[in-house]
Amino acid sequence: MRAERRREMKKIRLPQLQPFKAKLGLRWKISYFLAPKETICRVVSNPVSQEHEIWIHPGVRRDFQFFLPDTVHELCHCKLAEAVDPIFSTIAFRKGYGELKGEAAKKFEHRARMIYWAQAHVDIWVNDLRHSHWPELTQADHESFSQSILELAQIGQWQMLESREGILGIAQHLAEVRRYGLQPVDFSSVFQGIGEKIKSAITELSEFYESLPRLSYEREKDLQTLEKSVKQAAKRLELPISPQLIEDEGRIVWQILELENSGEGGEKNAKQKIFYLSGKGERRTRSSGLSGF
């Protein structure tokens, strides 16, 4: 699937991002690709070749300044990949999962999606870095996101707001408002529409996000923080997974214990590339307020 998407993409240049790249001190090669079927930006970091691929959706070409917080967000993912570990940039799974077939493959994809949801708070750390250099991008990001959420409430898009991505996106927004000392937006119309149960879930999750420790930029310590926090997030989201970070030929990847215990984990020593789950990323978009999951 990822290979098919690559064939549809066109390599482009974005010299406007060079000052941001320089400020972050990025060392690896960065290639930008226009991805016509994408609605969000995303990044794939390869520690072996020391390269980053940043996929750019068409909206960035139409209004670069509006989507600047998004593209700089991807560069900050690149920095965490270089300074800590690529698992903070690209979600990867151990090799054997790539050879699963039939029902076993479906079970893997279902649980891998759960890891995407449980690891959504990596964006908090990415935005910590962005905010430390460019607080004005944080402000712009939050203004457009809150406007999108209020517009969705105004037109009655409750199903979207109550979805998993809605809960995650709003919780992250509220956590960052407090984390960065931003001016809060009145979301009373949103909370009145979504109901008390969803409001409670968002509040609890946002408090958890806000409490996340800052990264130390010490690899082992931050990997432990990541694994622990993802397990905590999975529990709060009532996701039946027990994800574990392991080293697979020098690369940190996710292992899903439920697949291992059921004997559906595939061959651990298969000679193939680290397996990446294709599909939409975990971040919200600035055009719609929410991302697809």
Image (spheres, grey):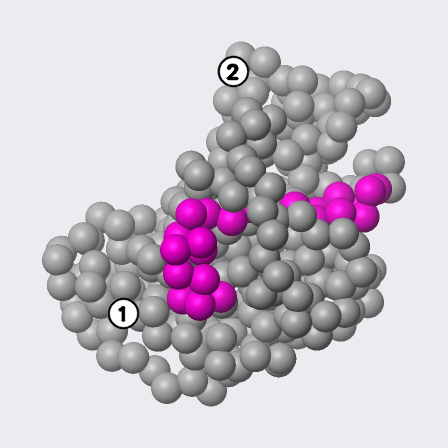
Going 58% across and 65% down the picture, which residue do you hit? 16
224 relative to 198 in the view: left or right: right
Q: Which residues are magenta?
A: 45-68
Residue 289's spot in the image, x, y percent?
34, 59
What is the three-letter code of the residue carrying label 1? Gln
Q: Decide if residue 32 is on the left or right side of residue 155.
A: right
Under tag 2, what secondary structure? helix
Q: Of residues 185 and 210, which is closer to you in this image?
A: 185
Q: Say which quadrant the C terminus sits in.
A: top left
Label 2 to label 1, Cα distance in Å?
41 Å
Q: Residue 26 colored magenta?
A: no
> Furthest-top residue in view?
102
Query: Eyeballing the image, is 202 above or below 47?
Result: below
Q: Which mark is residue 160?
A: none
In the image, residue 140 lies at what x, y percent? Answer: 41, 75
Asked if 76 appears above or below 36 in the picture, the reply is below
Q: Is residue 177 above or below residue 243?
A: below
Assess disc 1: are there few (<14), some (14-19) or many (≥20) residues with their C-alpha within 10 Å of its C-alpha: some
Residue 102 vs residue 195, the one in the foreground: 102
Q: Amino acid at mark 2?
A: Glu
Residue 3 place in picture, x, y as percent: 60, 26
Front: mark 2 or 1: 1
Front one among 211 and 57: 57
Whether residue 51 appears in magenta in the rendering, the answer is yes
Residue highlighted by disc 1: 147
Which residue carries the number 2 mark?
Answer: 103
Q: Is residue 36 visible?
A: yes
